[in-house]
Amino acid sequence: MSTVFIISAPSGSGKSTLVNEIRKIVPGLEFSISYTTRGPRGSEHEGREYFFVTRQEFEKMIAAGEFLEYADVFGNYYGTSRNFLRQAEHREHDLLLDIDVQGADQVKQKIPEAVSIFILPPDRQSLESRLRHRGEDSSEVIQRRLATATREIEKYCKYDYILVNDRLDDSIDLLKSILLAERRKRSGAQLSADDSILAKAERCRLQNVRERLQPILASFTSATVPGNC
């Protein structure tokens, strides 16, 4: 049985970099490439970053029930084909999903045992700086992304693990530990209290990071109150 790992983060939090790095160092991990109706950007290629389809083609796939999850984001559809899960199960690999909070909700409804990981920036100022440094968006779009980030961050309590991405090398190590620790648990392997991989993973458990999250949440105006977490 494949384990499904869900990774979500506000745009600009460094999620894509983390995912790319973790795919190089964790074996037996399938990665789903999303379908989208938006056009390619920069050096993006068909079948590498996304599968680029028309809105009509995407809506036909919705009608046929071909998506594990999908969402309309800033006027464009994004979705994960069910085929990726079938392929992972056939190869006895785990599946890594790089999806937003809307998609994560949909997947958790279908696969409650999926492991969910939320990537957070160190604070709002760092996130805005990263978005501006990318040079992809206008100031208006950046402000819209920051507003969306605030709404997404308020959903942090729905995730199993929270990883604050302030130092890339540390974040890669922690993400790797989460994936490996979950694999060990689900395989029925004996776990010891002094297991360094398990210890690193547990540091990112939702219940173990609440105190650290408070200043991060406070930097996003609407997220100062943790809602129903």
Image (spheres, rainbow, N blue to C red):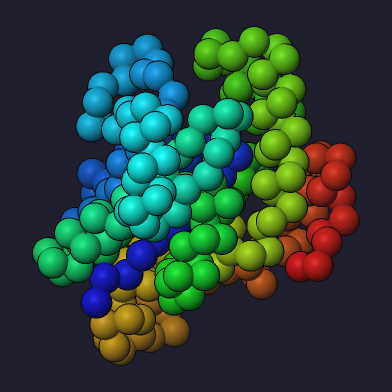
Give whichever of 24, 59 is nearer the camera. 59
Image quarter of residue 196: bottom left
Please determine whether, in this image, residue 228 is positioned above or below residue 99: below
- Note whether residue 194 is visible: yes
* 109 left or right of 97 in image: right
**Residue 144 coordinates in the image, percent (x, y):** 71, 26
In the displayed structure image, the side of residue 148 where residue 130 appears, left or right: left
Horizontal placement of 95 versus 166: left or right?
A: left
Query: Which residue is nearer to you in this view: 219 or 140?
Result: 140
One can see residue 175 in this view: no
Residue 115 lies in quadrant = bottom left
* Nearer to me, 207 or 28: 28
Task: For the N terminus, give its image quadrant.
Answer: bottom left
The residue positioned 55% from the left and 39% from the top of the image is 72
Q: Tell me the quarter of the image containing the C terminus.
A: bottom right
Q: Which of 84 and 128 is in front in this view?
A: 84
Horizontal and vertical percent position of residue 132? 62, 16
Location of residue 73 in the rendering, given as x and y in whole percent from the top left corner: 57, 35
